[in-house]
Image (tube, rainbow, N blue to C red):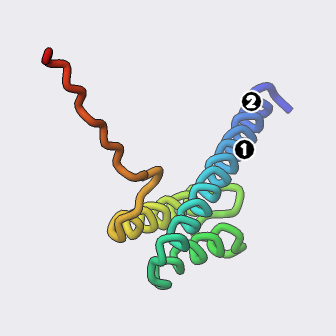
């Protein structure tokens, strides 16, 4: 094996590891978005996006061969965007809390 082949194999391995890390991060974000939808009582049709993306991620039938997870990542990004849009439309959001009210201090001399 030549040095060029070894470098290419290492770079390909690093690319696959990077894609797997991104896919796992997106999967975690999707699980959090699904939890947000459950807590907000969002209609069921929006939850199918979550399950469809998860099934596509683990499915052996892909648009691109399995070591290349770019299509899986794209599907998960679309699903995540749609889930957050549905949550925002329902009035709930990521990290949204009750508004804080601060009373003004009266510094005028009496």
Specify whether 71 is left or right of 88: right
The percent coordinates of residue 17 (x first, y second) are 72, 44
Q: Which residue is mark 2?
A: 7
State the separation of the CA atoms marked 1 and 2. Answer: 15 Å
Give the mark, 1 or 2, whose residue is nearer the N terminus.
Answer: 2
Which residue corresponds to the image point at 19% horizontal and 25% vertical from the top-left?
Answer: 106
Residue 9 found in image quarter = top right
| Residue closer to the observer: 44 or 110 | 110
Pick out the residue farthest to the front: 110
Residue 4 found in image quarter = top right
The percent coordinates of residue 78 (x first, y second) are 45, 64
Specify whether 21 is left or right of 82: right
Image disc number at residue 41: none
| Residue closer to the observer: 67 or 25 | 25
| Residue 74, above or below 106 | below
The percent coordinates of residue 6 (x first, y second) are 80, 32
Q: Secondary structure at mark 1?
A: helix
Pick out the residue farthest to the top: 109
| Residue 93, above or below 108 | below
Quadrant position of the C terminus in the picture: top left
Which residue corresponds to the image point at 57% horizontal and 62% vertical from the top-left?
Answer: 30
| Residue closer to the observer: 48 or 56 | 48
Image disc number at residue 17: 1
- Binning the other alpha carbons within 10 Å of mark 2 as few (below 14), some (14 to 19) or many (20 upward) gives few
| Residue 11, above or below 3 | below
| Residue closer to the observer: 60 or 99 | 99
Q: Secondary structure at mark 2?
A: helix
């Amino acid at each position: 094996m030549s040095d060029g082949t070894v470098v290419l194999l290492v770079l390909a391995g690093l690319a696959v590891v990077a894609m797997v890390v991104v896919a796992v991060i997106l999967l975690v974000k999707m699980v959090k978005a699904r939890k947000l939808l459950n807590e907000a009582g969002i209609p069921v049709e929006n939850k199918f996006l979550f399950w469809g993306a998860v099934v596509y991620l683990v499915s052996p039938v892909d648009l691109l061969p399995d070591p290349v997870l770019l299509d899986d990542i794209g599907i998960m990004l679309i699903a995540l965007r749609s889930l957050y849009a549905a949550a925002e439309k329902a009035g709930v959001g990521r990290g949204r809390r009750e508004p804080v009210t601060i009373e003004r201090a009266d510094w005028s001399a009496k």
